[in-house]
Amino acid sequence: PKLNEDDNQSDTSSQKVIKRKVLRHYNGKPTVCDESRS
């Protein structure tokens, strides 16, 4: 269970980072902060 949790967290973190990068490149504005908080 622990390994699964770690893997899940890692995946989510990676996806979040990618989303933030994409949003940043797309908008080019500090809107990423709001999205990251959500």
Image (cartoon, helix red, strand yellow):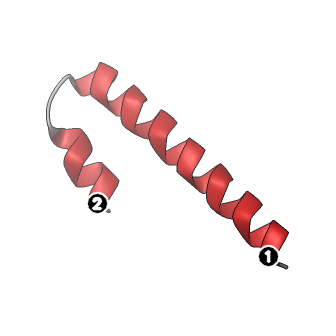
Residue, x 79% and y 76% (percent of image)? Answer: 2
Q: What amino acid is found at the position of numbered circle 1 in the picture?
A: Lys
Q: Tell whether 12 sits left or right of 30.
A: right
Residue, x 15% and y 29% (percent of image)? Answer: 29
Q: Tell whether 21 sits left or right of 18.
A: left
Q: Tell whether 32 sits left or right of 18.
A: left
x then y, percent, for residue 1: 85, 79
Residue 6 versus residue 19 in the image, above or below: below
Which tag, 1 or 2, sits closer to the chain's start? 1
Name, please, the residue furthest toward the left. 30
Which of the labelled discs sits on residue 38, or is there none? none
x then y, percent, for residue 11: 67, 51
How crowded pointer 2 is (Cα within 10 Å; few <14, some 14-19, many 20+) is rated as few
Q: Tell whether 14 sits left or right of 21.
A: right
Q: What amino acid is found at the position of numbered circle 2 in the picture?
A: Arg
According to the image, label 2 marks what residue? Answer: 37
According to the image, label 1 marks what residue? Answer: 2
Residue 7 versus residue 29 in the image, above or below: below
Q: Nearer the viewer, mark 1 or mark 2?
A: 1
x then y, percent, for residue 21: 39, 29
Residue 11 versus residue 37 in the image, above or below: above
Q: Secondary structure at mark 1?
A: helix
Q: Secondary structure at mark 2?
A: helix
Residue, x 31% and y 22% (percent of image)? Answer: 26
Number of marks: 2
How crowded pointer 1 is (Cα within 10 Å; few <14, some 14-19, many 20+) is rated as few
In the depicted view, which residue is nearer to us: 35 or 3?
3
* Pointers 1 and 2 in contact (C-beta within 8 Å): no
x then y, percent, for residue 37: 28, 60
Residue 13 versus residue 23 in the image, above or below: below
